[in-house]
Amino acid sequence: MLDTNFDPKAVEASLYEAWESSGAFKPRASGAAFSIVIPPPNVTGSLHIGHALNNTLQDILARFERMRGKAVLWQPGMDHAGIATQIVVERQLAEQGNMDRRALGREEFVKRIWAWKEESGGTITRQLRRLGASCDWSRERFTMDEGLSRAVLKVFVQLYKEGLIYKDKRLVNWDPKLQTAVSDLEVENIETKGKLWRIKYPLADDASRFVVVATTRPETMLGDVAVAVHPGDERYTALIGKMVRLPLTDRAIPVIADDYADPEKGSGAVKITPAHDFNDFEVGKRHKLAPIEVIDREAQMSGDIPERFREMDRFEARKQILAELEQDGLLDGAEDIVHAVPHDEKTKLVILEPMLTEQWYVDAKKLAGPAIAAVESGKTKFTPENFANTYFHWMHNIQPWCVSRQLWWGHQIPAWYAPDGKVFVEESEDAAKAAAKAHFKKDVPLTRDEDVLDTWFSSALWAFSTMGWPDETPEVKRFYPTSVLVTMYDIIFFWVARMMMMGLHFMKDVPFHNVLIHARVVDEKGAKMSKTKGNVVDPLVLIDEYGADALRLTLAMKAAPGKDVRMGRGVVESYRNFGTKFWNAARFCQMNECVNWNAFDPTTPKHTINRWIVGELTQTAATVTAELEAYRFNEAAGALYKFVWNVFCDWYIELIKPLLNGSDEATLGETRATAAWVLEQVIRLLHPFMPFITEELWTRLGEFGPKRERMLIVETWPDLPESLIDPKAAEEINWLIGLVSETRSARAELNVPAGAKIPLLLVGAAKESCRRLERHQELIDRLARLDYSTTADAAPTGSVTFVHGEATVALQLEGVVDFSAEAERLVKEINRLDGEIAKIDGKLGNAEFVRKAPKEVVEEQRERRAEAQAAKAKLEAALQRLRAAV
RNA sequence: GGGCGGUUAGCUCAGCGGUAGAGCGUCUCGUUUACACCGAGAGGGUCGGGGGUUCGAUCCCCUCACCGCCCACCA
């Protein structure tokens, strides 16, 4: 016999092991292909609740399609997370008192990272297993592994040769601590308190007059090349073309006219520092003013500046410059402001510096064209659809993608330089040498570019590089394009867009047919989870406490398209309870020998209750399938939740108890088989959501019934014909349920003691209702706790009444119940009906409504009015009887 | 500044042209042999404000307010 509770801890690990070792996670040899590539988590990462949601959804789809007979490939792996990993290992070196990476040297440092990766990397893949993720681990990939590195090389070289990768010197966001360029996308602008200083720039030919400029960054003034004013700004038109003296230096700079200067802002005159400001860079270009670099890569002052500032930290320099300006009487006050200051998104520690550097760029604009077209034409579809707009907006305004990083951990750029600076981009050093030799007609020494590629460069190839490309593997043929990409909206730009571009360019086809964008997991109050806030919910703690199934069901139930998922442990507990409920329903079936399911033909049951539940199940199965196909996980899970708890447990099990204890052998056998079969179908339907408990039940129930031939994970998905739905059975059982519910309600409302058994009379009932009462009498008596039930011609005086369909139900309660309470109840009900009738009359009295509304709607209103009227009449009669009796 | 989303029961959220729903919480009752991680029942909402379209609006449109998020900018 089954225990009263499911113990996830006791079975999860071994069930997972059984699945994996059976080969169930590998795509089957035949069948339509269904593939998903996992959004590769960072090798440094550990499972957070967002991963839990993301992978739960993927796993639900993978298991669903696997059961539907498809050859499912869920491709797992990790990315090398250039910056994050390098930081982790550098920190570790420091903690262990080792030399820093520069002292260690590049080769040794990279070796240490690999060692770290082998030892500590990939925690997350073990944690994904605990969640139940059915990835094909035998195919696990890493962006830095040999195959993927080969793909990276090939892609870089080809794009270079096609002119789609080039080197350029322009401003990038620079991290002075890590000393690397970072992507514009990785910049987080943080609102910071600061000051806006007003500085006087004296006119070169008349030192008594000034142009006042406003700035939040006085230290950059040493690199000013001009002061810009708006051409239409009358305050300054006279000054255009004149020179001003740049304070603290001996340089004079021109006053130029440019639309960029906004008369509304600051003083209307703006200092132009092309080397250290993105907007100024553009202004400088327009006016052919060469940038003057005054801040170096370590964020120290440098270059052509007064000696005293040299090698001074940028913020030290700011203080010093302000002090000197003050002394010279050139500071014209300051105001406090709050402005957005660029920080590195990951570390958030260092203020980034716009820096003029030479970097490698991908011509994203050219690659974006086909990627935009593919979404426009529907070759790739976003769910929810509106995320396509986000995608389009970014793609239409796409900027060159800076792909080089000044790090050591990553794919080193395959570019070699000859002594004269001539660059050779080839897949290997030998090829570069050969190319150089061909070019120079002799051997020349080459040095390789030091930089590595942005991690997202390799991630962009993930959909095909993981399948073995550039080799023509069977996997590429079979599983590319992938079926669906499941991801969050925050990486549409980083990843989805770039995969689209690379996929279309190199594979000549989209990387995925569907992009399912899910929401973010936030805390119970709706706030973003963060370590600093301390509101992080750890999925592993939840799994320990409630089991992986409870966590998964919670996430699925809450994953409404486009909505943030709020998580607290309370909800997880309630879905754990659902698991227990389901477990006990199975336990009930097993205890009552409802275990022989395999020879059952669902078209055969004779008994209404059995025909009804088969129909209900059929409907539920259809809903679950349709909702999963549409990625509405919450609807699919919700339909199952309702069916299991509110239909199967609340009613079916209660309804069949008498049949199971009855003496009718034929009905007994049929009921056992039906219950077993329905349970069996539900176990299958629930499996994608709750794989552990369902697999365990599958195994355990198999000990009592026919032998299981295979594990549930590879069983077939219920595909039930609509013909199994019997509307007449549904009508009858709904009548019965209604009768019982209303009786219970009346009893409770009138405080009839729960144990009291009372008689029920069905008055004025149609033949069909009488027959129904007769057929289900035993059940009704039991469920409504009746002494007996019967039909009658008239309601006896002194009874409690309610209306059920065409009939009046009278509960004989004389002596048990307070009749003034009953009168009150009747009056309340009559008033309610009056309200309804009035409302309907309002509609029907409106000629426009009758004329314009669809016939069915008008007819429905008429019927409802008639019903309400009839019910009211019955209740009024009951009220009169009651008053007469008192 | 541009864009997207939200505002529905005490809380968290579904629903989205034609009788307002769930989970949790609250209250009452209950040891009916699957389950107290349970059962039965109840209470609780002019569906953010205003306007419009419509025979009819929680649902569509406009507008306002507030709350999120994304992008851009911040002299």
Image (cartoon, coloured by chain):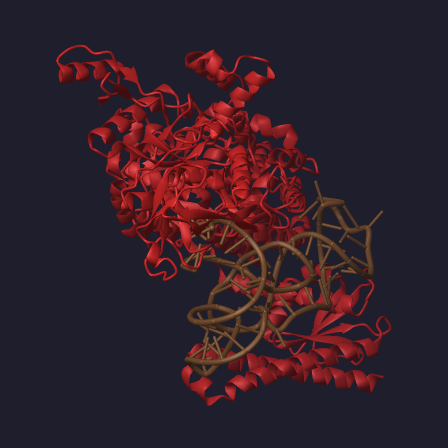
Chain colours: A red, B brown
A625 or A683: which is nearer to us? A625
Taking A794 as reference, is A269 above or below it? above
Q: Quadrant of residue A848?
A: bottom left
Any part of residue A390 in sight: yes
Q: Quadrant of residue B12?
A: bottom right
At 34% across and 37% down in the image, what residue appears?
A291
- Left or right? Give the position of A497 relative to A647: left
- Left or right? Give the position of A384 relative to B10: left
A760 or A157: which is nearer to us? A157
Taking A98 as reference, is A867 above or below it? below
Residue A502 at x, y percent in the picture: 29, 36
Residue A408 at x, y percent in the picture: 42, 21
B15 or A756: which is nearer to us? B15
Q: Quadrant of residue A483?
A: top left
Residue A396 at x, y percent in the picture: 31, 49
Any part of residue A350 in sight: no
At 65% across and 30% down in the image, what residue appears?
A9
- Left or right? Give the position of A421 relative to A647: left
Quadrant in which the N terminus of chain A is drawn: top right
Quadrant in which the C terminus of chain A is drawn: bottom right
How many marks on residues?
A: 0
A621 or A267: which is nearer to us? A267
Taking A264 as reference, is A477 above or below it? above
Residue A549 at x, y percent in the picture: 59, 39
